[in-house]
Amino acid sequence: MSECIDRIGEYVAGDRSRFEASRLVQDAVMRNLQTLTESSQRLSDDIRACEPQVPWRELAGFRNVIVHGYLGIDLAAVWLVIDQDLPPLAVALARMIARICHED
């Protein structure tokens, strides 16, 4: 999941116009969002419970929107996810990884 966030960051480089102007970038971002959201569903309940502020259920729902393209994909909404939702998710994932690695 962290790798997907890193890749998305690399593809868009914090630039909304870059994202909006390139179907190639959009496709790459959407693919990584799909992988990220599908991966989130594979986490155990115990692991998810460590970060209760992460909207795990909404992530699963967003996966369905991406995969099935309900009502088309709204690029402005996807950008909001990239800009507003991925940074705190990346922080939560880093804490989860640190916690898991510390337990080993």
Image (cartoon, rainbow, N blue to C red):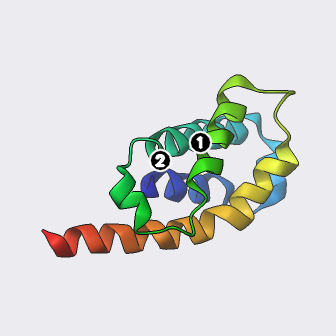
| Element assignment for label 2 | helix
Q: Position of residue 81 (x, y in %)?
A: 72, 56
Residue bearing the label numbered 2: 40
Residue 72 position, x and y percent, is: 85, 28
State left or right for residue 54 relative to residue 46.
right
Question: In which quarter of the view is residue 100 placed?
Answer: bottom left
Residue 60: mark in rendering: 1
Q: In the current view of this chain or complex, which residue is farthest to the top?
A: 68
C-beta proximity under 8 Å, tags 1 and 2: yes
Left or right of residue 2: residue 58? right
Viewer-closest of 31 and 54? 54
* Left or right side of 20 for 33: left
Q: x, y percentage for residue 23?
A: 76, 35
Q: Is residue 71 above or below residue 42?
A: above
Residue shown at the point (51%, 45%) measured from the top left: 36
Q: In the image, what residue occupies the spot 35% across and 59% down?
A: 47
Q: Is residue 63 left or right of residue 52?
A: right
Mark 1–mark 2 distance (CA, rounded to whole Å): 7 Å
Q: Mark 1, residues whose alpha carbon is within 10 Å: few (<14), some, or many (≥20)?
A: some
